[in-house]
């Protein structure tokens, strides 16, 4: 889409062997957010760059509404990175009470006054942002965000700065979150000082490139290898500078990762609800976030905003270097599967016929018969049920739901000749799910629904936890292992061996696959980690931790 069309995106896709296409014959989409119903027509081999429901952090008001909810629920110690925020006009009186405190102090001493920064909820590039220390200066009736101004920012050479970091989420159930190793350090163009015109000077307070490029003092980067001069540095240059000064960069870096994880967890439940309604396949979506954070003089980290469509314009050699590596590593991380849409449609059609014809392998011999718990009709016209495999609850069905196409069909020669783009007609918008008994990875026998009820999160904490896993569970682990193996310049920050203990209490409800991957990461630290890998990919006997 033209609104998000950047050279680093198009060039990376072309170098990966892809070509731009129109219609529904595509493998990967980079563009606007889809409408909810548009997700329903995705095939297992198509990937889109947004999840449904992530506007809960993409708009500033929604972001801080969710963070304030988590802060009230889990306390300020957990969500320490959220500045005091008021949503106007609803919180008008609360903001007025805060600013009225300024009348009790020396009006000439701006240092001791409450200052709030006013932001529109859905704008970008610094548009509509201004500072106030008097309620009379706040425009009434408009939907805005009032956030306590960080009065003691960390400065370099007297200049205030913020960090633009990048995070990529490839799945919400299980949650898989990555942070890009590199980022941008963006400086204001006026030195930070408390003076009479403190409130009015935008070049002192705002670090946005779109604002400061208009300043006569803006210093543009001209060499990607010289990343510590001018008004924009790399995060690597900032880390180097802080270490040389003896400042605790490593602690700041850990806090940044913590901020990203906790922010994504704040909307995890809402996004998963949307996914359950509109997305058929676990790995259909991915999303790149621009995460803006600020460091204060005590090296605390504060979240400023999240961009679900971060700017990838390359205005300098440094921008081009960082953002090109960002997108290239993202394409490797997400993974694209070339496929023949015609072959896929035929496979879906065979599955539909099997369902309609009662799974008669004699009529449709080219597909294996599966155990579904549904037998041919008896003389009374009613279907006989296999009670050992009949779903007994919605939770059982959720755990046992299998994708209609668990493995992709091979690409045809025609497909390859067209440069890897998908070909053929669109499959039906949605297929009826079939409940099957799932083969267990430990003994190759079918697990009944009664047995599946015993498979709970508690069983994952046993030393032989892999003995209760199904083939679908193994596939979830394989997805994670294969994805992290090709992560490039990304770092996996969720799941890790520590995430279950560190973040489990922040989820509205525990999820089996989140705990499973955390346990897998812990198993990878065991002395016999190689035995677990052999079990995962070669069906070797079950190891124990």
Image (tube, helix red, strand yellow):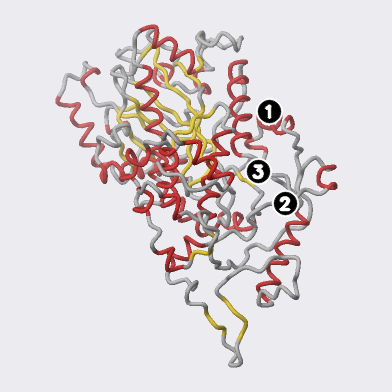
Dot placed on the residue nearer the N-terminal end, 2 or 3 = 2
- Quadrant where the N terminus is found in the figure: top right
How packed mark 1 is, by other alpha carbons closer than 10 Å (few <14, some 14-19, many 20 or more), is some
Mark 2 in CB contact with mark 3 (< 8 angstroms) = no
> Real-space Cα distance between discs 3 and 1?
15 Å
- Quadrant where the C terminus is found in the figure: top left
Mark carried by residue 24 = 2
What residue sits right under mark 3 in the picture?
A: 29
**Whole-percent x and y of residue 412?**
81, 49
Quadrant location of residue 69? top left
Q: Nearer the viewer, residue 116 or 179?
A: 179
Dot placed on the residue nearer the N-terminal end, 3 or 1 = 1
What residue sits right under mark 1 in the picture?
A: 7
Badge 1 element: helix
Specify whether 397 is left or right of 383: left
Q: Residue at x 42, y 12 (%)?
A: 190
Q: Nearer the viewer, mark 3 or mark 1?
A: 3
Relative to 128, say whether 42 is above or below: below
Dot placed on the residue nearer the N-terminal end, 1 or 2 = 1
Badge 2 element: loop
Relative to 334, say whether 339 is above or below: below
């Amino acid at each position: 889409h033209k609104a998000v069309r950047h050279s680093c995106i198009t060039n990376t896709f072309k170098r990966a062997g892809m070509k731009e296409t129109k219609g529904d014959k595509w493998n990967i989409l980079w563009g606007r957010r889809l409408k909810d119903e548009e997700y329903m027509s995705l095939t297992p081999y198509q990937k889109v760059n947004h999840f449904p429901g992530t506007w809960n952090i993409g708009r500033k008001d929604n972001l801080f509404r969710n963070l304030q909810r988590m802060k009230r629920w889990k306390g300020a110690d957990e969500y320490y990175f959220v500045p005091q925020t008021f949503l106007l006009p609803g919180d008008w009186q609360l903001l007025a009470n805060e600013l009225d405190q300024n009348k009790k102090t020396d009006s000439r001493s701006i240092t001791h006054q409450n200052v709030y920064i006013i932001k529109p909820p859905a704008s970008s590039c610094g548009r509509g942002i201004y500072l106030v220390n008097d309620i009379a200066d706040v425009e009434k009736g408009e939907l805005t965000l009032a956030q306590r101004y960080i009065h003691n920012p960390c400065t370099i050479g007297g200049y205030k700065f913020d960090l633009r970091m990048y995070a990529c989420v490839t799945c919400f159930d299980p949650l898989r979150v990555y942070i890009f190793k590199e980022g941008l350090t963006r400086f204001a163009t006026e030195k930070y000082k408390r003076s009479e015109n403190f409130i009015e000077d935008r070049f002192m307070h705002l670090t946005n490139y779109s604002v400061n490029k208009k300043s006569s003092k803006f210093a543009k980067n001209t060499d990607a290898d010289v990343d510590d001069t001018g008004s924009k540095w790399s995060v690597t240059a900032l880390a180097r500078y802080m270490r040389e000064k003896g400042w605790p960069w490593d602690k700041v870096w850990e806090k940044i990762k913590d901020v990203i994880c906790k922010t994504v967890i704040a909307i995890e439940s809402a996004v998963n609800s949307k996914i359950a309604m509109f997305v058929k396949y676990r790995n259909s979506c991915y999303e790149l976030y621009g995460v803006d954070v600020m460091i204060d003089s005590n090296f605390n980290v504060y979240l400023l905003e999240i961009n679900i469509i971060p700017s990838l314009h390359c205005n300098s050699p440094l921008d081009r270097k960082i953002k090109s590596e960002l997108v290239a590593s993202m394409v490797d991380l997400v993974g694209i599967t070339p496929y023949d849409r015609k072959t896929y449609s035929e496979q879906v059609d065979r599955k539909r016929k099997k369902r309609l014809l009662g799974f008669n392998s004699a009529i449709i011999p080219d597909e294996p018969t599966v155990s579904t718990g549904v037998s041919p009709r008896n003389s009374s016209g009613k279907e006989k049920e296999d009670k050992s495999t009949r779903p007994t609850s919605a939770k059982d069905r959720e755990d046992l739901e299998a994708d209609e196409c668990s493995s992709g069909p091979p690409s045809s020669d025609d497909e390859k000749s067209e440069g890897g783009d998908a070909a053929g007609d669109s499959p039906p918008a949605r297929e009826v799910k079939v409940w099957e008994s799932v083969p267990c990875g430990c003994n190759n026998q079918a697990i009944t629904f009664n047995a599946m009820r015993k498979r709970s999160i508690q069983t994952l904490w046993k030393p032989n936890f892999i003995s209760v896993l199904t083939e679908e569970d193994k596939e979830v682990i394989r997805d994670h292992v294969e994805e992290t193996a090709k992560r490039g310049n990304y770092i996996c920050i969720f799941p890790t061996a520590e995430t279950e203990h560190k973040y489990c209490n922040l989820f509205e409800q525990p999820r089996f696959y989140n705990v499973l991957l955390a346990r897998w990461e812990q198993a990878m630290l065991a002395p016999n980690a190689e035995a677990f890998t052999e079990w995962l990919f070669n069906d070797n006997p079950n190891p124990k931790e």
